[in-house]
Image (cartoon, grey):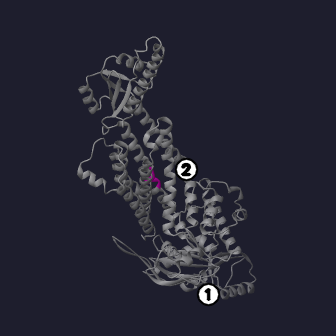
Amino acid sequence: MKAFVLLRKDIRTVLRNRRELFWMIMLPMILLGFNYYMQGRALQVQVALVGDDTLKPYLREQAKQLDGQIELTILNLNESEAIERLAQGSINGYLRLGPQSVEMFANLADTAGAVSEAVFQQMVRDLNQQLAEKQLSQLAENPADILTPISWQVSAAGKQTRSEAQLIFSSLFVIMGIMTAMSLGQQSLSVEKDRNTLVSLRKSPLTDYQIVWAKMFAALFSSLLPLATIVAMILLLMPEQFLRDPVFYLILVSITFNSVSLGVLIGSYMRGANEGNSLRFMLTLPAMFLASMPVSLPVWAERITSAVPTLVGAQTMRSFLMAGKLPNPAAVIYLLLTGFLAIRWAGQLLGREE
Amino acid sequence: MKAIITDSLSKVFISKVGSNLAVKDLNLTINSNTIYGLMGHNGAGKTTTFMLLNALLEPTSGTALMLGNDLVKNRSKIRPLTGLLTENLRLYSELTVEETLDFFADLYGVKAPVQELLKRFDMSEWRKQLIGKLSTGMRKKVSILSACIHRPKLLFLDEPFSGLDPIAMQGLRDFVRYLMDVTEITVVIASHNLKELAEICDQVGIMKEGRLVVSGSMDDIKSKFGFVDHLRLLIDKPAAGLGHIAEFIEPNMIDVINTPQRLNMVLHLLQEQGISILDINKRAVALEDIYQQIYQEVGR
């Protein structure tokens, strides 16, 4: 219970530190604003139409009526050109139009691809509605002339194609999860050192392990603030499928716990705040870089990322967001285990004699 | 009763660059309910001694009894019995005075009469004030209160006078004396401010290069090292026959060593000659002088 007293005090001091709080909330908002801007650009959707020409005028006309949030450009290509350009990522999808069916090929991992799929699905639905109404009016006059509704199919194409938006999300969450969390973990102890209050804590009935665990939980709680802000804003602005996936939160919590623990370890080892910053940056910057890497890594780099906890976290988040890969259980266990070990080590280092 | 008895207490720090003997063969005895002043240059071993006596460091060798508890065997028992104010303690600027004291009381699991304490120390009106907005003197008061909120039997104050103006220093002295009056507490103060130590301490000790070179009451130390206080007497007319027991600074001013024997002799001779004393000025040996001389002489 005495550790809870320290935990409560730490959370209270973080919540009262207006400058820190401002940046904890503002930084995700700034990054999200940037992301939103990038998303806005991605919503300039380019879709190719191939096949039967009879539906093309209708689709073009409907596309013109879309409000300004989506700039839909419709291109006339043959199918082989469309396949090639979709693979290159220069179009977001293409529609193969048949007399009674529309098949869509789009990169559904890409926001623009997913949006175009939704737009055209709605258009085909509207068309079918119109056909149904026409059928009803024509049925009495000429029962033989029944129009058949157009069927709609979607085929996800090029799922592995690089998605700009997902890259930004990936790096954004890693920035929040790793950088802020590690900073808060480190600060929680180094500020006590700078203020000379750590001796007072160590003199109290608290054990060194209780101190570092209390620090870890307080920093973890504080780290959830910016993360919650960013999740709430994304949900509000642009509902993303991954936010509803519990696996996403499992990865996020694992990364955050690991980062806070490493931060506490740095804070415990270093004499003050300034000394720990360079070490923290050494661990976080490569993780941020890795999270926003658009290409696959060479084997040697993959090996390195599988050893450094922060890079394991970044790589796991990147794989999940970009390729929809479920995290390797070993990676999550590794993050949790290294987090626990970091706290244990921090407890030992706290009482070291200099 | 003895509050602290150390027996050849030593502490060696070992690092990559070598070993550093921070405290060597410390033999210190401090009586209960007294104020003890510890002096010494920077790096003399005062802070390490405080850390050792608060069971925050493990001694390399030697033993100590803290209020009857073995320092090595009963570390967890000793910690709640002591209070420690570290040098440059800045506390938590985001907490109020009241919250800070509550925090330390909760940490020790004690129900402290925080409101009563604040009232007693004229700090009630500051209770909702953030620590970061307090003056240095007020912050020092809160620091000391937080160090003794759990009612320790032994209070260690490391450089409590640093950064304080003369009025705040006076306030701090009164504060410590008040603590002595209302609680059974032994206070150990490490400071470079020898004037303040001389004012407040019952006993003093001087540390040099990790060793305690002198310890005792001011009078004991003075007599041990031959320091004497002097009295300067202003008389209404020149006196005769005093040359062997006093020194004439001016024809009407004599300087006499402040011992009962000498003083009686001088007074007797002045009375015989019908000389009146107009003024008496005591010239006590300053702790600074004692400190400097002992520091230069001992352990060379």
Q: Main secondary structure of the magenta part?
A: helix
In this rendering, the answer to whether B216 lies above or below A104 is: below
The residue carrying pointer 1 sits among few (fewer than 14), some (14 to 19) or many (20 or more) residues within 10 Å by Cα, namely few
Q: Which numbered marker is on residue A17?
A: 2
Decide which of B225, B260 is in the foreground and name it: B225
The chain ID associated with circle 2 is: A
Q: Position of residue A3 (x, y in %)?
A: 55, 64
Q: Position of residue B7 (x, y in %)?
A: 50, 86
Kind of residue indicated by mark 2? Asn
Mark 1 or 2: in front is 2
Q: Picture quarter containing residue B248?
A: bottom right
Left or right: B296, with A10 as reference point = left
**Magenta stretch bounds:** A180-184
Q: Quadrant of the C terminus of chain A?
A: bottom left
- Secondary element at tag 2: loop
Residue picked out by circle 1: B244
